[in-house]
Amino acid sequence: MANYLKSLLTFMLVAASLTTSSLLRAEEWKFAIEEIPGSIMDAYAQEFKKRIEAATNGEVTITIYPIGSLGAPTETVEQAADGIIHFTNVSVGNLGTIVPESQVFLLTYILPSNPDATSKILSSSDFIYQDLAQDFEKRGLKLHTMYSEGPQVWTTNREIRTPQDFKNFKMRVMVSPILLKAYEDMGASPTPLPFGEVYGALQLKAVDGQVNPAATIEEMKFYEVTDYLIWAGEQELVTTIVSGTDWYDTLTPERQQLIADTMADMVDFIDRVVVRFNKEKLEKIKAAKPGIKLVELTPEERAVFRERSKNTHAEYVKIVGNRGQQLLNALLKEVESSE
């Protein structure tokens, strides 16, 4: 009996030790997104969660927080910088007041028209990950990756084909100095509003239009309170995934490499998701509202808006200074090489 009790005690001590060791190794990574469950950002976060948890045999678990769970997008970026959360996926339009340099991706008619070329720049550009990343680091942020959610689409209550059509037109935009300037230069009256207020503002005619990819327009039901979907070719919705540098620097080199490798391997995955979501959700819009009018601007019509975008480029340099000119030149050079 004594030997049995001794063996049982030994077993319990070993089990307790293993459990404690496991708990010490276990980590929870909090991942905030600025969109709803079932969105493109959610698809990315869910796939990242699946891959990381599998690669670490469950030593790392990831909890995903959709839109509004932890505050506004800018607040989640601040929480990431403070180490309160570990990842946040936010569009560049919500970074303007935190990392002004990133607004180079809000300039109209600047990215390649070829989606593959845009994807390559956003996922592997030296300009982004060796240059622009330094501007994130100055704000305590580690820039992991960028990707596009697809072409921006104007949802409007009247047809827009020229800058004159934008006269007295209140266009909802994200809170970004460059976006305000961009739509002012195109002839509209830009109106910043939180994302959660857009539907009501469209419904009550407080704004006349908004801009987002087709997938977001369907998910948020913006098509219900609008008459036109207009493809002007002016922008892609570029998003970023960032962490706080203080937290990131505490990770082992192996963990850091795992994050980098996982996100690099997910480029093709998210590109396919973006194409599929935008195609399928546009079809849902057409089925739900057969009378909605779809408009694609001609090359000549786009050229008029493109010419006006030069003023926005100058404003970006004015806001960011010499650093802005350097970044703009570097991006334009990469775009030219890609085409």
Image (cartoon, grey):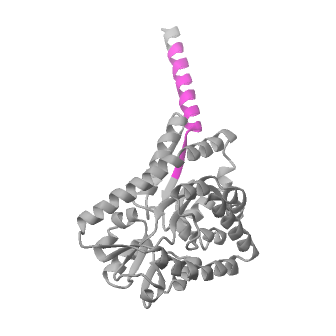
In the rendered view, tell whether residue 88 sits above or below residue 267. below
Magenta segment includes 44: no
Q: Residue at x 48, y 70 (%)?
A: 233
Q: Which residues are magenta?
A: 6-30
Where in the figure is residue 162, as x and y percent of width and height? 45, 84
Where in the figure is residue 102, as x and y percent of width and height? 63, 68
Q: Nearer the viewer, residue 42 or 75?
A: 42
Q: Is residue 37 visible?
A: no
Residue positioned most to the right: 322
Q: In screen coordinates, is 51 left or right of 99? A: left
Q: Is residue 223 visible?
A: yes
Q: Place residue 207 in its image quadrant.
A: bottom left
| Count of numbered tags | 0
Q: Nearer the viewer, residue 207 or 29?
A: 207
Q: Residue at x 57, y 62 (%)?
A: 79
Magenta segment includes 7: yes
In the rendered view, tell whether residue 67 sits above or below residue 309. above
Where in the figure is residue 165, as x and y percent of width and height? 42, 87
Q: Nearer the viewer, residue 159 or 70?
A: 159
Where in the figure is residue 316, as x and y percent of width and height? 65, 77
Q: In screen coordinates, is 182 left or right of 42? A: right
Q: Quadrant of the C terminus?
A: bottom right
* Main SS, magenta residues: helix
Q: Place residue 291 in its image quadrant.
A: bottom left
